[in-house]
Image (tube, rainbow, N blue to C red):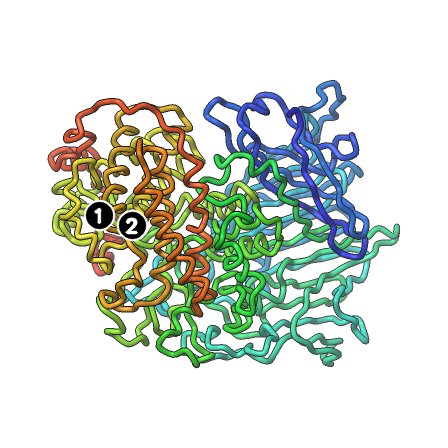
Amino acid sequence: MTHLPITIVNTSNHRTFGHFKQGIPCPKGQFLSHVPLALYCNGKMCDTAYISITNLWDDGSIKWILIHGIIQLAENEEKTLTISTADMSCHVEPVAVKHNKQRIEICLQDQSTQYISTNTPLSLTRENRFKIEGSLNATAFSKVEEESTEFELLKNGQKTTAVIVRSAFTVCVEGKPLSIVQRIYTFLSTGTLLSTVTFTNPASAEHPNGTWDLGDSHSLNIAELGLDILITKCNPEIDASSVNFPQVPTTIFQASSGTENWQNRIHVDHTNNVNLAFKGFRAYRESTCILEGSHIQPRVSGTFSDNSKVVIEVADFWQHFPSSIVVDNERVKYSLLGSTLSAMEELQPGEQLTRDFSISHEPLRKIQVKPHFTWLDSSQFFPLFNSDRKTNPFSALIAKAVDGENSFFKKREVADVYGWRHFGELYADHERGNAPQDTDFVSHYNNQYDPICGMLCQWVSTGDKRWKTLADDLAKHVANIDVYHTKLDKPEYAGGLFWHTDHYVQAYTATHRTYSTLQPNDVYQDHAGGGGPGGQHCYTNGLLLHYYLSGSETSKQALLSICDWITRYYEGDGTLVGALLAIKNAGNIGLKNVMTGAYPFDRGTANYLQAIMDRFDLLGNTQDLDKCAAIIANTVSPNDDISLRQLSDVETTWFYTVFLQALCRFITVKERLSQNDADYSYAVKSLCHYVHWMIENEYVYLEKPNILEFPNDTWTGQDLRKLCVMNFAKAYFPSNEALVSKITELTRGIYERLSKSTEAETTRILCLMMQNAHYDVYAALPQPMALIEHNVNGHRKRSFPVFLIDTLKRFSLARERSQLAKRFPKFQKWIGKP
């Protein structure tokens, strides 16, 4: 196939001017990376879109591309675009972009010029039209400590159609640093501007005794971060397409969600009280309230003397409350984080927020691309998921996540999962087990079992855009709030993913950070009551897939942050201080034993493997694949005495199947790359060794409820992992009648339980099904290669002396000092901050 079809749809009943941004998978060998690609519409090359390459196959051909563009569609119109090699005969005009120490100048096709500041965040101007300045607490940024700016020409074929300017700044908020990263896309033909800005508090939290409550001394208390907009030579107005105002308002303030449960305890501040001003939004003309309601999506617009227009809009206005927009003569103040009309907002250490805004000549809407059936032709794009819902008995159960009375959308309403910190999160309703009637119970899910990945796979296989909406909202939340964005805490915490909030108890003032001082102790067996990010909770597959499908840099950076963190969690940071602590902790459950080199046979090591394979997929560094082989060799062996693993002690070993799923993926990667080596042979033999045990010993967990502390249907959801592993292993068993019989037995038992379960619509079980009910695809993935002989006992084993030598080789006094300062803050008064 010499072209790739792309379908976009306007589902509204009116003409739409919109933008689309979509990652597209390309079959191996279809497009060569050195040949420019172009997007065509009705046979003509689009001058309002660009194409960029985001990933390559191992043979150098294109694997993933990103298309991003502006388009106009009639009501209910469906339009097919095509991607193919570019027409090289087209004459290409040069694009005028100038760069100096003060600003970047971009000449648009209408001959006007746009200026973007290189030394002040959120500062841009379009001559004779508008001027935007970033504002902090109602004033312009007064002190910028660091800045960096770069730009890139974005092309459709050989023609430059857009320019992206990437900038990073560090500013001061009452003497504390605030990081600001902005990406500004300017489409040259229309002048349409799309911007993404991320605010980060890069400090580390105090977390006394492993608790993470609001009110940390390193938090940033912000009245308002926003845009101060001057629209020249016209009087701007506020409007909203879904609301009819009796008069044109001058102020709109969204104080809360406006839903029935708008005062839910999810919104507590550091005092553990909910202090929202009122329900929903209020619109004012001068100081008089002219309208109030539940929620609103406003925009500001202006008409110039030549009848041209400008429309400025911040996405998800009401969902990220408190939000406000205020017009005063030619000036508009548009909030991005917090509002001067509400109480101060606390941006916690390591917490960040990403907002999107647009500037165009008419209202701009987001348009989704329809998944195409060709995307499903190869499971290499979406590894280990089900592409045919019709043959999977669990599809109807999974569909209740968007269709049922307890869908994810309905769960949002129950717990009022709105506001800048919460929007996109999943409500962990299964944690209400000890208080089922408590409608004010708050528990946060924090991407356990990777629902981002499950939602995206459901979207691709069903075409239902509700799945994509959920995935986009959740991915942004996870990447911003659930990841700990600091380099200043101890290595096993910094950059990591926070656990879901503690089981069966209110989150209180911990927000999305697991443990609160207000929570009771001894809630369940082995209750910790304190801690931080840990290897058992590390999920990156969905962030990788979201980056590929959406081009989200926020998701990509979160993925890389988690990969770096999980590596430090198991391997340490290479300092002598870290090595001594690792020796002290050798043998502790859940940690790598540096004395023997052994990794725990659990989901933490499995998550570590998955993360490193995701990074390999993204960056192509072969050292990551070698690292995976070493981890496997130091976790399992084809010669293991499985009885010593005590797999019959389900409470402490159930997650062995999570590791085997990661092993299946490693085998798949080796087969796709045709790497028939000792690492491949070792992995296949190890898998088969454990599957032999599964054939003889596995059962549906709830058949033996007496050995479980909480015998609920979460265990049945975990049973699905067995089907994944055993279906994959069929290809490596010369005679598999017993294996097929066991698969049939387990499938029947699992489906019977979940189809009748009252718990199947709870968040955790829905996520387990989304992640693991595609076991039939596991059966289709293997491409077995002949196994080679190798020395199993000596395979990639790492000795303790090598660990010490490597640590000593990397010794640095500066790094040792930094490690001490991070791990023991009380020393900072003598040795300085990290």
- Residue name at image x 43 percent, y 33 percent: 619
> Given contact means CB atoms under 8 Å apart, are the residues at marks 2 and 1 in contact?
yes
Q: Is residue 160 left or right of residue 142?
A: right
Query: Horizontal and vertical percent for residue 24?
Result: 59, 37
**Where does residue 309 sit, x and y in percent of width and height?**
81, 53
What numbered label is drawn on residue 38?
Answer: none
> Is any atom of residue 203 visible in this view?
no
* Identity of the residue furthest to the right in this view: 306
Q: Mark 2 points at which residue?
A: 604
Picture disc at residue 600: 1
- Identify the image quadrant of residue 681: top left
Q: Is residue 487 above or below residue 734?
A: below
Q: Is mark 2 on a helix, strand or loop?
A: helix
Location of residue 518 by image quarter: bottom left
Please state which amino acid type lies under the numbered disc 1.
Pro
Quarter residue 674 falls in: top left
Tell whether 752 sits left or right of 92: left
